[in-house]
Image: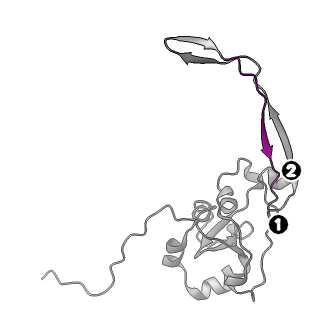
Amino acid sequence: MGWLSLRRREPALCPSSDQYKPVTDWKASTEHVEIIESDYPKSDQMTRGVITDDQYPLQDVTTSDDSLPFIPPAIVRSQRSQISKQHRRIWIVIDNVVYDCTNFIHDHPGGDTVIRSFIGEDSSWQFWRFHSRSLMDTFGRPLRIGRTMGVENRFKEPPRYVGGSKSRW
């Protein structure tokens, strides 16, 4: 906690009728300033926006999704906008669970482009169109690092047309 004293250095002009005249009020103004502690990691790298493996490690496969540590959505989204690509983590969100695909991206059978296009974003409906629950349990579960809320998919899901259709003949 601390106090900050602010003073005007030069007189300000204030309107009076049609003319401007200097303000001679030189009272010192003070403002109360408080240091607010946060629960975020306090490393020097965090202040520069660099996420390290030890800050958000891979979680045990036996941990339930509800028991995963919470990662604020701003931190998840920040991975997309990292200026230094070499420090960027490749995180994607599927059903509010954050997956670290940094080491997996080169092994992805569909290539790395599709994963890179969703860094720091939700990709739930796109993921489920091409993958099954058993694939997620086998390959995705070991990549989980946490859970989040509020990270949205930038693409609107198109409707699925399932079922019988009328014959044209």
Secondary structure mostly seen in magenta is loop
Magenta span of residues: 23-36
Residue at 64% of width from left, 59% of height from top?
Answer: 77
- Residue 69 locus on image (x, y percent): 74, 75
Residues marked 1 and 2 touching at CB (< 8 Å):
no
Q: Which residue was labeled with disc 1?
A: 55
Q: Is residue 73 magenta?
A: no
Q: In this view of the protein, which residue sits in the foreground, 49 or 2?
A: 2
Quadrant in which residue 71 is drawn: bottom right
Please state if 153 lies on the left or on the right of 88 as rendered.
left
Amino acid type for the residue under numbered disc 1: Gln
Q: Is residue 161 left or right of residue 106?
A: left
Of the numbered discs in the image, which one, if any, rests on residue 1? Answer: 2
Q: Work out whether 138 lies above or below 21.
A: below
Residue 68 higher or lower than 89, as above or below = below
Q: Looking at the rendering, which quadrant does residue 74 occupy?
A: bottom right
